[in-house]
């Protein structure tokens, strides 16, 4: 198993990062909130999980080992593959998922694209004894990765993240507009708008609009 990859970021797309590792470009599938922490040419370290299929080998990347562990545990539930597990972590932090499952919070799971009411009920039953209790480790991205200088504007990052999750451009634009006041408040305080938090808020807005 490839536990992590480390090296400069050679390329970024809406759902993939390429890290140069020993002269080799390693393509890593990442959720939008993970991609938002990466910068072209800057060093990065991603915890990884290798998913082996008959016709493919796919490496999934995460900001830390806890995310990777939850990603793998989610797939022990029937009907949950790597893409759905990654989508769940794109919407909720590991501790938020633990809390949702431990408290039977159906709405939290239906906020994930691809999970309906019946699917959420089934997941709550199957995962109840697998994820464990919240660890109290803080925010989704924590303070483990500093933001390099010269990031893309927050709205471009957020829109790319939403499109990467499968939303149409129009829906992404409306969601970005809905969370713009939060971003502007952060800018007024002299800090960079927190894209991962804005992403979760945008997804909640899209879920209410269904």
Image (tube, rainbow, N blue to C red):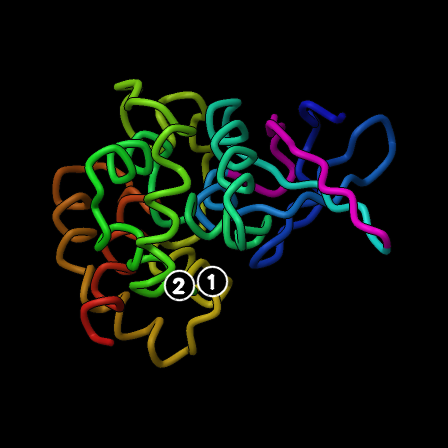
Name the residue that disc number 1 marks: 165
Which quadrant, please, contains the C terminus? bottom left
Instruction: Compute the Cα span from label 1 to label 2.
Output: 8 Å
Answer above or below: position of 16 versus 26. Answer: below
**Which mark is on residue 113?**
2
Between residues 107 and 208, which one lies in front from this camera angle? 107
Q: Residue at x 38, y 61 (%)?
A: 115
Q: Locate residue 83: give its quadrant.
A: bottom right
Where residue 191 sits: x, y (%)?
Answer: 23, 37
Q: Are marks 1 and 2 in contact (CB under 8 Å)?
A: yes
Image-based side of 179 in relation to 29, left or right: left
Seen at 35% across and 23% down, the residue is: 132
**Residue closer to the observer: 191 or 161:** 161
State the SS at label 1: loop
Residues in magenta, as a range: 38-54
- Quick check: 85 left or right of 169? right
Q: In this picture, is 26 found above or below 199?
A: above
Q: Is residue 16 magenta?
A: no
Give x and y (percent) for residue 160. 46, 62
First in sequence, mark 1 or 2: give its number. 2
Q: Which image quadrant: the N terminus?
A: top right
Is 155 left or right of 5, judged from the image as shown? left
Q: Nearer the viewer, mark 1 or mark 2?
A: 2
Q: Residues within 10 Å of mark 2 (few under 14, many from 20)?
A: some
16 over 37 or under it: above or below:
below
The secondary element bearing badge 2 is classed as loop
**Majority secondary structure of the magenta segment?**
strand
Q: Position of residue 54 (x, y in %)?
A: 85, 52
> Among all residues in the image, which is located at the extreme bottom?
170
Instruction: State left or right for residue 209 relative to residue 8.
Output: left
Q: Quadrant of residue 100?
A: top left
């Amino acid at each position: 198993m490839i536990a992590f990859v480390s090296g400069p970021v050679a390329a970024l797309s809406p759902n993939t990062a390429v890290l140069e590792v020993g002269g080799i470009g390693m393509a890593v599938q990442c959720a939008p909130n993970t991609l938002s922490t990466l910068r072209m040419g800057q060093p990065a370290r991603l915890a990884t999980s290798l998913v082996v299929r008959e016709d493919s080998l796919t490496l999934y990347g995460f900001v830390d080992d806890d995310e990777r562990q939850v990603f793998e545990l989610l797939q022990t539930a029937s009907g949950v593959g790597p893409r759905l597990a990654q989508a769940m972590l794109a919407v909720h932090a590991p501790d938020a998922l633990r809390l949702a499952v431990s408290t039977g919070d159906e709405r939290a799971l239906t906020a994930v694209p691809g999970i309906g009411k019946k699917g959420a009920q089934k997941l709550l039953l199957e995962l109840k004894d697998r994820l464990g209790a919240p660890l109290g480790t803080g925010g989704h991205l924590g303070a483990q990765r500093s933001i390099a200088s010269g990031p893309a504007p927050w709205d471009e990052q957020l829109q790319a993240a939403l499109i990467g999750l499968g939303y149409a451009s129009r829906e992404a634009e409306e969601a970005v507009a809905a969370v713009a006041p939060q971003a502007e408040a952060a800018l007024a305080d002299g800090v960079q708008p927190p894209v991962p938090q804005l992403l979760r808020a945008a997804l909640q807005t899209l879920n209410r609009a269904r």
